[in-house]
Image (cartoon, rainbow, N blue to C red):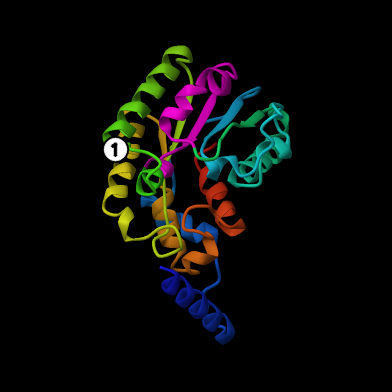
């Protein structure tokens, strides 16, 4: 895996030196990742509360004891703060409140354990969830004994609980993703990880949620620059990867 990563870096530098690396165009990447070039969208309204939930990809080093909205320290340094900044600038008249409650290391059942305080009590109008990579990663490193069936069952139960408490909530389900050949992501992830991604899509369909196909987006992004440009370890995005995610997420909003 490290050898492949080194080869990718060398190839990246070689192409850049030759001036042959394609210009990175996030709009082009997103357009090529989705049939028709556009996502289904959900409408935001005046006074809406938007909540980002998930694991470390969403957490992104946020200040967890800060419960304020629209605060860069509380939103972390990842895709959530980039998406929030864009929304707040574009929709200044709507008085949006945006929160990030992602927690590093979380799996679905751990979302459920903190769901009252970190979701239901916030009463979001739009809830975005990115969860699943730890459900397989921690299994592979011996820290968890979950299965895709547990992931699916726990996720459905979490959303049923959410819809019961907040029947008008709008859901955005983000596809768990990984970039093969970059550090942490090796052949052991596959084909099992595909089942988690399939489950996330089926759950999104079941709950009439918007689905953001992050895996397709990162796959397409690697046609413009190697995996190590978009993520340092195959899971956590680089600054460019975070911007790619934020841009994709924003396409789901109107």
Residue furthest to the top in view is 165
**Residue at mark 1:** 147
In front of the other: 163 or 210: 163
Residue 16 placement (x, y as % from top left): 57, 80
In front of the other: 44 or 121: 121
Residue furthest to the front in view is 142
Q: Residues within 10 Å of mark 1 (few under 14, many from 20)?
A: some
Residue at 33% across / 38% down in the picture? 145
Residue at 47% across / 65% down in the picture? 227
Residue 197 placement (x, y as % from top left): 33, 44
Asked if 40 appears above or below 161 in the picture, the reply is below
In front of the other: 53 or 207: 53
| Magenta part of the chain | 106-135
Res. 207 visible in picture: no
In front of the other: 112 or 219: 112
Determine the image quadrant of residue 118.
Answer: top right
Residue 159 placement (x, y as % from top left): 40, 23
Res. 132 visible in picture: yes
Left or right of residue 106, residue 193 in this image: left
Residue 153 placement (x, y as % from top left): 30, 27
Q: Residue 223 lies in magenta, yes or no?
A: no
Residue furthest to the bottom in view is 18
Q: Residue 112 lies in magenta, yes or no?
A: yes
């Amino acid at each position: 895996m490290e050898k492949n990563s080194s080869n990718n870096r060398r190839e990246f530098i070689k192409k850049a030196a030759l001036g042959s690396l394609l210009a990175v165009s996030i709009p082009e990447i997103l357009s090529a990742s989705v049939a028709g070039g556009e996502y289904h969208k959900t409408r935001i309204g005046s006074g809406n509360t938007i909540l980002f939930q998930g694991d470390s990809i969403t957490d992104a080093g946020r200040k967890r004891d800060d419960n304020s909205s629209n605060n860069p320290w509380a939103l972390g340094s990842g895709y959530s703060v980039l998406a929030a900044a864009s929304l707040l600038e574009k929709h200044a008249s709507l008085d949006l409140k945006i929160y990030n409650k992602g927690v590093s290391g979380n799996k679905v059942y751990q979302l459920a354990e903190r769901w009252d305080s970190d979701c239901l009590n916030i009463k979001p109008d739009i809830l975005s969830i990115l969860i699943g990579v730890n459900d397989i990663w921690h299994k592979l490193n011996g820290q968890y004994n979950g299965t895709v069936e547990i992931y699916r069952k726990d996720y459905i139960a979490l959303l049923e609980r959410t819809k019961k408490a907040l029947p008008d909530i709008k859901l955005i389900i983000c596809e768990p993703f990984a970039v093969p050949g970059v550090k942490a992501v090796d052949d052991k992830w596959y084909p099992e990880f595909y089942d988690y991604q399939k489950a996330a899509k089926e759950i999104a369909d079941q709950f009439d949620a918007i689905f953001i196909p992050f895996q397709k987006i990162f796959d397409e992004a690697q046609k413009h620059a190697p995996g190590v440009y978009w993520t340092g370890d195959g899971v956590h995005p680089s600054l460019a990867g975070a911007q790619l995610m934020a841009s994709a997420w924003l396409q789901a909003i109107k």
